[in-house]
Image: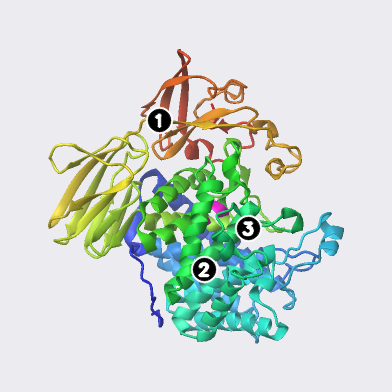
Amino acid sequence: MNYRVDYKVRNLMNTPELGSCSLGGEIGARFDRFIYERVSGRFAVEEILKEAEDFFKTQYDDIYPVGYWRSEFWGKLMLSAVRCAKYKKDERLKENIRKSCYKMLSFQRDDGYLSAYGDSDNIYAADGKDSASYIGWSADWCWNIWGMKYTLWGLVEAADLLDDVFILAGAVKLCDWIIAKLEKDGKKLTDTGVMNGMASGSILKPMLLLYRFTADEKYLDFCKDTVKEWMRDDGKCPNIINNAFSGKSVGEWYNACNGWYPKAYEMTSCFDGMVELYRITGDKVLFDAAKALYDILIKYESNILGSVGYCERYHNAASYADAATEICDVIHWMRLCHELYKLTGEIKYMESFEKAFANAFLAGVYEDGKGSAFFVRGAGRHWTAIPQCESKYQHCCTNNVGRGFANAAESCVFEGDDGYYVNMYVQSSTKFGDTEIVVGANYFDIGWVGVAVRNSEKGKKLYLRIPEWSKNTKIRVGVGEEFPVDCGKYFELELGEGTTFLKMRFDMTPEVIKMNWEPIPEGDYHLIRWIDGADGLCDRSCMLHTSKVVIRRGPVILTRSKKIGAKEDDMFSNETLYGKNITSVAAQYTCNNTTNLVTARVTVVADGEEYKYVMCDYASGSNIDSHDPKYFSIYL
């Protein structure tokens, strides 16, 4: 399906078609397992997807005083399915997508309404008193427009994949219903839903995609009107554009006592839509606001796991030694970095993307491909994503995982005007036309990576991202001599015709990161989110109770884990390297037959004594649905 509206601002960096890039090695195998188990396999289609479809038949989401979010599940599954169908060139999956969309549209009312909420007037925040009588505390949950966002997005991307005007027409009817409903009620999009309208506001991205396909100006006008509500002179909450320019941490934008809930996933999704609106209109304020938010998150919200925020909030996570982060937040942090990189080509965005992907994201995707974490933690066990909203199979984070993997596949190599930019050294293959860029194995373990560029055009260049952590990187072109290159920059190479071979040797010297712990007051949010049901599996004693250190080797955090034989008493003792004079740290790669990205024997010399550990990458050492409350720890 062709776009009828072009961008005013084009990307400096272009991604490959999903069918022209693939992840290899262990990470590619993890993606393939997930695709089969959650997207394309028989159980995934006949049970998981069918359940999500049936929510729109039963319309169960608003039978209680607070609304559920089951209406998001189908759209998320569909977005993953569309991307995976492109990635695997899976014709059978494409037909399943068509059938599912047609089934969904059979539930659409004549006026265009399509939701798992039965009451089409129920698009505003729930009454706190009514909700308290039902769940015991005041909640304003209404996820109706939020769910429509995902339904709309799934329909638009499916219509594009299948070149199906019937599916696109259903998306148009749904979008028209939303606009007409708000006009009739005399309300703004930001008046609906939860979290001061941020959840509903994230509909900008799919609505702008629909605008580009239809050229219907009312969709563009609606989006422009929405962003005006985010830069108000009166400062009305959440005012996310003006506040992004304040430089203050998100948690300090408003007083939590007055209802400020800085939920990361929804807010970041709104900025994703802003970036798209900038491409269409050229309004630089939107672009600058997104970049300003990135800077705020790096400064105040970076956590040791490579993500941003604590659990699902922007709550000054960078000031806490302990870490826990929601998988949805990781994925949307990756998306923000990815989109900003496409527009700027600035290396810092891919540095952040790699750390998030190689640590928090991969840790949250369970090794069997059947599920994921809800929150990943730095110690103990992850909070597994158990089915939500009285469903059998659905969870907000698990249904998003396919999109995260696809984003990573697209991010290995980009194409600029003058050549190709290799940004991640995950084993992969990427094609732009007849040119293929192949990245070999061994990045995470021994740090030696081969790169081959085949059928390159004369005059094109190759740009290799030299990570900021690799202080002593060396490159060999063909059979030539090794030579050093600067870290934190791109190494530029003129490509000849035919095939170019390179060998890269990264500096995998371990980095010691000190985590300065301070007591967390009882009742603080950072403590509350360590409660995981009545079984006590997420034991608070696994949180830090003293300052410790973390070791990063290359792009990955290392962990001790029972998966590789670590002892519980050693991992969770009060012994710490934090206050000691650390004079050296070495990590000797250990060759084994595990599926870990890396396993290493780590030796730390501190106060003249040697401390020895067997460690592996955090993602591999923790990516299971463990019922052991003390399974791993990144802290020493």
Q: Quadrant of residue 598?
A: top left
* Vertical position of residue 307 compared to residue 220: above or below: above
Residue placed at 51% from the left, 80% from the top?
220
Q: Are marks 1 and 3 in contact (CB under 8 Å)?
A: no
Nearest to the eye among marks 2 and 3: give it: 2
In the depicted structure, whether residue 438 falls above or below residue 201: above
Nearest to the observer: residue 267 or residue 457: 267
Q: Which residues are magenta?
A: 328-332
Q: Which mark is residue 394?
A: 3
Q: Which residue is mark 2?
A: 273
Can you tell which of label 1 and label 3 is closer to the viewer? Answer: 1
Residue 561 visible in the shown view: no
Against 461, residue 17 (above or below) is below
Cα–Cα span, label 2 and label 3: 25 Å
Residue 304, percent from left and from top = 52, 40
**Local secondary structure at mark 1:** loop
Question: Overall secondary structure of the magenta stretch?
Answer: helix
Q: Amino acid at mark 3?
A: Gln
Q: Earlier in the sequence, mark 1 or mark 2?
A: 2
In this picture, residue 383 sits left or right of residue 617: right
Mark 3 closeness class: few <14, some 14–19, many ≥20 residues within 10 Å: many
Rendered residue at 40%/50% (across/down): 348
- Please give the residue where the numbered disc 1 appears in the rendered image: 510
Q: Residue, x 60% and y 61% (percent of image)? A: 266
Q: Give the Cα distance between marks 1 and 2.
A: 38 Å
The crowd level at tag 1 (other Cα within 10 Å; few <14, some 14-19, many 20+) is many
